[in-house]
């Protein structure tokens, strides 16, 4: 990998440039460590706004920022674009598609991937939204389906193309459902005047008894009410059993015909090969209260991929725990080349979700908000959290234009998406 060896510095290898990994990479002292950051992309993705890329609200480059531009002009820092395939814990080496590399300390911050819960059909035919390429695929699918609907005479097939099923009623599912509903109300009737947009159906399916499980009951009820007002059909206590590319099969023999199933029903840690089964719990790497893996003294895991057993069900797989863990670990490394005896304590700063124009819910430790004020706070928090001044300006400009003109100007099919053919055997 062409990384020079510096005899007086310990080498810290960080795998993953998400919220957690980027925090560590930015803050580790270069006079104490040689830092090597590895990621499969050369950019950091602001994942909370992926749904806006998918619904043509933002261009992808407004939520992505070059890693080399974030960490530049720093000595003893190296970035390599690579996929890590295997970790040899005995030899203290990682193996990638561009070569192998020795480490003194290893920090795993690989984040999470979509969890299909072992259903191969759902994985084959549904649309995930965990990365920028996947968000662009979804944008293309939405626009392609309306273009195709203009040409189809079969009303049943047209209805299937214009029906969107979102599986998962967490913040991602709620925000995506709201964005699609607003497209239906404000945008699509003008783009497709010769198409009956009112026949577009948006379904939000949730396996539990309410939306936004991680938020308060009050916020869940408000999200439910706001989405219903926007025309979204909400299914609670609804477990999806299968999907064949045309029909969503649910419990109690319920069905929805749709060509568009968006899977937002869960994630799991992106674990690299090399760990024992005993080191894994709930598809995440077990760590102690200091974010050190339970078996290896020099390997740490942070962010979505880490499971701290002392915290009930592990920390939420969201940005805030990842950022806090990244800050904590970098501070401890900088103090003593390892970790201190002070355990990591997660500070819950609150959670929020936007439902649409002037509609959002916010749960803070001491109070809750809904409506316009919550929406303004949601916008501000996400705006200041974006990496890079340029990205903040672009996002703000887009939001202002969309607010006053009800227009999303990036409704472009840059690369057509080709669906997988139904490969299911006929019964």
Image (tube, rainbow, N blue to C red):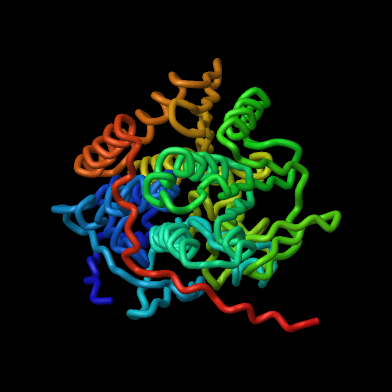
Return the residue found at the far left: 73
The percent position of residue 201, horizontal first and vertical second, equals 60, 48
Residue 127 location (% of width, % of height): 54, 62
Tell me the residue at 52%/31% (across/down): 351
x 44%, y 26%: residue: 358
Q: In this view, does 26 lie to the left or right of 263?
A: left
- Where residue 286 sits, quadrant-wise, is bottom right
> Which part of the image, by quadrant, shows the C terminus?
bottom right
Please give left or right for residue 219 compared with residue 141 in the image.
Answer: right
Residue 202 appearing in the image: yes
Foreground residue among 112 and 311: 112
Q: Where is residue 173 in the image (x, y as percent from the top left)?
A: 57, 45
Q: Is residue 92 above or below residue 207?
A: below
Who is closer to the viewer here, 275 or 258?
A: 258
Residue closer to the observer: 51 or 23: 51
Residue drawn at x 26%, y 63% is: 79
Q: Which residue lies furthest to the top in this view?
A: 367
Q: In this view, does 101 lie above or below 109?
A: below
As displayed, is residue 351 above or below residue 236? Answer: above
In the figure, is residue 427 to the left or right of 364? right
The residue located at (59%, 57%) in the rendering is 263
| Residue 15 seen in the current view | no
């Amino acid at each position: 990998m062409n990384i020079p060896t510096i005899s007086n510095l310990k080498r810290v290898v960080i795998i993953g440039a998400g919220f957690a990994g980027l925090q560590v990479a930015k803050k580790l002292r270069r006079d104490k460590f040689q830092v090597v950051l590895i990621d499969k992309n050369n950019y950091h993705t602001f994942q909370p706004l992926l749904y806006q890329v998918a619904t043509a609200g933002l261009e992808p480059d407004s939520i992505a920022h070059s890693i080399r531009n974030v960490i530049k002009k720093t000595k003893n820092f190296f970035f390599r674009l690579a996929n890590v395939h295997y970790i040899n814990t005995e030899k203290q080496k990682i193996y990638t598609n561009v070569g192998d590399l020795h480490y003194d300390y290893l920090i795993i911050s690989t984040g999470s991937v979509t969890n299909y819960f072992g259903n191969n059909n759902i994985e084959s035919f549904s649309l995930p939204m965990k990365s920028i390429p996947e968000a662009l695929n979804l944008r293309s699918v939405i626009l392609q389906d309306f273009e195709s609907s203009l040409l189809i005479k079969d009303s049943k097939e047209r209805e299937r193309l214009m029906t969107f099923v979102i599986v998962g009623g967490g913040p991602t599912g709620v925000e995506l459902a709201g964005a699609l509903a607003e497209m239906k109300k404000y945008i699509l009737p003008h783009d497709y005047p010769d198409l009956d947009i009112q026949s577009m159906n948006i379904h939000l399916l949730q396996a539990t008894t309410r939306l936004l499980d991680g938020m308060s009951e009050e916020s869940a009820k408000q999200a439910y009410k706001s989405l219903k007002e926007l025309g979204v059909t909400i299914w609670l206590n609804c477990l999806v059993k299968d999907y064949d590319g045309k029909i969503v099969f649910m419990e109690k023999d319920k069905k929805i015909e749709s060509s568009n199933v968006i899977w937002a029903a869960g994630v799991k840690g992106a674990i690299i090969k090399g760990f024992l089964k005993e080191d894994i719990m709930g598809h995440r790497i077990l760590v102690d209260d200091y974010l050190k893996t339970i078996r290896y003294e020099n390997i740490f895991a942070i962010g979505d991929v880490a499971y701290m057993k002392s915290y009930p069900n592990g920390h939420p797989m969201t940005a805030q725990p990842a950022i806090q863990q990244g800050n904590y670990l970098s501070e401890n490394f900088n103090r003593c080349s390892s970790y201190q005896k002070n355990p990591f304590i997660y500070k819950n700063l609150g959670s929020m979700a936007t439902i649409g124009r002037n509609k959002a819910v916010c749960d803070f430790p001491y109070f809750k908000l809904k409506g316009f004020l919550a929406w303004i706070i949601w916008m501000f928090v996400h705006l200041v959290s974006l990496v890079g001044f340029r990205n903040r300006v672009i996002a703000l400009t887009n939001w202002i234009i969309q607010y006053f003109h009800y227009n999303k100007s990036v409704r472009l099919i840059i690369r057509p998406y080709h669906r997988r053919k139904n490969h299911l055997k006929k019964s």
